[in-house]
Amino acid sequence: MNHYETVFILNPVLSDVQIEETVKKFEDFLIKKGSKMVAKENWGLKKLAYPIQHKKSGFYHLFEFSAPGDVINGYELEFRRDERVMRFLTVKLDKHAISWAERRRTKLKTKA
């Protein structure tokens, strides 16, 4: 199992219910394919550096998970098919990135 991190941006015109639905859809997809969720973060509405689909902001979400390598192609295909997703990026984490993500999570927990 490899460690991955996905950041995706959802359309800013979505309601809270639609956002929760979309996030749940991608989380369920990963779990159904045998992945293990490590962390899930909602970064909220943020201003974009440049317009995407004539929108100047979007709802950012981050998933950190462990999954078999063959799951990623289907996972990204689901992102491409969903019109509520404006952009997404999935990266494979190496051992340094994994330790950095753990330190970042513990720092966030101590702030809260």
Image (cartoon, rainbow, N blue to C red):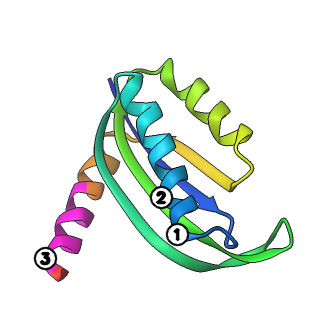
Residue placed under numbered mark 3 in the picture: 110
Callout 3: helix, strand or loop? helix
Q: Is residue 106 above or below residue 32?
A: below
Residue placed under numbered mark 2 in the picture: 20
Residue placed under numbered mark 1 in the picture: 16
Specify the amino acid type for callout 2: Glu
Q: Position of residue 81 (x, y in %)?
A: 73, 38
Name the N-terminal-most of marks 3 and 1: 1
Callout 1: helix, strand or loop? helix
Callout 2: helix, strand or loop? helix
Q: Position of residue 79 (x, y in %)?
A: 65, 41
Number of other residues with Cα within 10 Å of mark 3, as a class: few under 14, some 14 to 19, many 20 or more: few
Question: Start and end of the magenta stretch?
Answer: 102-110
Q: Does residue 92 show up?
A: no
Between tags 3 and 2, which lies in front?
Answer: 2
Q: Does residue 52 show up?
A: yes
Question: Residue sitting at 34 percent across and 50 percent down?
Answer: 97
Q: Are marks 1 and 2 in contact (CB under 8 Å)?
A: yes
Q: Is residue 56 magenta?
A: no
Q: Position of residue 57 (x, y in %)?
A: 68, 77
